[in-house]
Image (tube, helix red, strand yellow):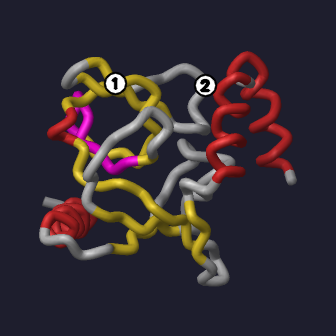
Amino acid sequence: MSNDDRIIEETIRLVGEGVSVTLPVNGNSMLPFIIGGRESVILQPPSHLDVGDVVLAWVKGGYYVVHRIIAIDSDAVTLMGDGNLAITEQCAKSDIKALVTHVVDANGRRHEIDSQWRRCAARLWWHLRPIRRYLLAIYRRL
């Protein structure tokens, strides 16, 4: 088991005990809302899940992701990273291990992920999927 796997397993154990955990994130799959390598997320137990929530989940294929819920159908949940163009992941509700409540920026400031403007921006970003490739290319150059 790698160190990353141990950290995630310990994170999940603590969240399961009701402890709020701050976890650094890597990768670009949640751009532009979570910047991997620079920001962290605050995780709490997932009490109620809705489309639009950002979660830590164990997905089919055998790995963990921090992605947004795009569909819930009974026990099946479909996830997609905000920075992904078309790739989705699936998991069962029981495989969702934590709910992201805040993003912590590089300066240590906490930003509520469920604020009205972030929810609105995420919905708009979802509808911009056909041109997301170009918007992300511009964003990465800035």
Kindly state the secondary structure of the residue where label 2 is placed: loop
Name the residue located 19 percent from the left edge and 62 percent from the top edge.
Answer: 12
What residue sits right under mark 2 in the picture? Answer: 85
Name the residue located 26 percent from the left edge and 52 percent from the top edge.
Answer: 47
Residue 100 inside the magenta-drawn segment: no
Kindly state the secondary structure of the residue where label 1 is placed: strand
Q: Quadrant of the N terminus?
A: bottom left
Q: Quadrant of the C terminus?
A: bottom right
Name the residue located 56 percent from the left edge and 46 percent from the top edge.
Answer: 30
Callouts 2 and 1 close, C-beta under 8 Å: no
Give the dominant element type of the magenta stretch: helix, strand or loop.
strand
- The image quarter containing residue 35 is bottom right
What residue sits right under mark 1 in the picture? Answer: 72
Among numbered discs 2 and 1, the one appearing first in the sequence: 1
Compared across the picture, whether 126 is left or right of 78 comes to right
Q: Which residues are magenta?
A: 55-62
Q: Amino acid at mark 1?
A: Ile
Q: Which mark is residue 2?
A: none
Q: Residues within 10 Å of mark 1 (few under 14, many from 20)?
A: some
Compared across the picture, whether 2 is left or right of 84 comes to left
